[in-house]
Amino acid sequence: MKRLQPRLDALVARLPLTAVQYLKFGIVGGLATAFHSVLFVLFIEVFGAEPMLANTLAFACAVIVSYLGNYRWTFGATRRSWASFLKFAVVSLIGFALNSLAIFIIVEAMALSYLWVLPFMVGVVPIVVFALNRGWTFGETRRVG
């Protein structure tokens, strides 16, 4: 990793701030998604939770992990606050609701395969969530540059 770090630093130095933030946002999101998935299975297999409850609990835990990863590393927030965490949670719920709405429309109303939801979930919702977090959640607290 020590050999790779200077190359990553050089690459990051050439990218615009928004691109760097989006890349970091994707990394944190990927880690939070993995955490969510592990907890989802754990809650079902170990604790016997129903899938909907397991998903809700895992989602809540993943939101916390995602906030902790994004507040300082992705957006460079200089101070933690309950207000920014609550905004982050609201934005996360908006993303959750957009995904749920897409599932309802595409799978339930249009009777199409759930696979048709994936481009929206992967291509649209993360951009909306990133923009809301960058502008609203961390807009007042992030470092310049």
Image (cartoon, rainbow, N blue to C red):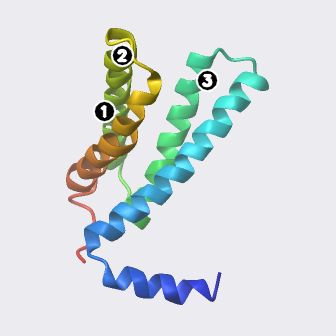
Where disc 1 sits, the SS reads: helix
Q: Residue furthest right?
A: 46
Specify which label sits upstream in the sequence, 2 or 3.
3
* Amino acid type shown at disc 1: Ile
Marks 3 and 2: in contact by CB < 8 Å?
A: no
Q: Which mark is residue 104?
A: 2
Residue 99 or residue 42, whichever sits in front: 99
Tell me the quarter of the picture where residue 94 sits. Answer: top left
Depth order, front residue of 83/99: 99
Badge 2 amino acid: Phe
Residue 25 image point, x, y percent? 40, 58
Secondary element under disc 3, as helix, strand or loop, is helix
How crowded is the residue under tag 3: few (<14 C-alpha within 10 Å), some, or many (20+)? Answer: many
Q: Position of residue 127 (x, y in %)?
A: 29, 48
Q: Residue at x 32, y 21 (%)?
A: 101
From the viewer's perspective, is the residue at label 2 or at label 3 nearer? 2
Residue type for callout 3: Ala
Q: Residue at x 34, y 26 (%)?
A: 97
Q: Is residue 5 above or below residue 128?
A: below
Gap in Å between the C-alphas at discs 1 and 3? 19 Å
Q: CA distance from mark 2 to mark 1?
A: 15 Å
| Vertical comparison of 105 with 98: above or below | above
Residue under pointer 3? 54
Quarter of the rendering occupied by the N terminus: bottom right
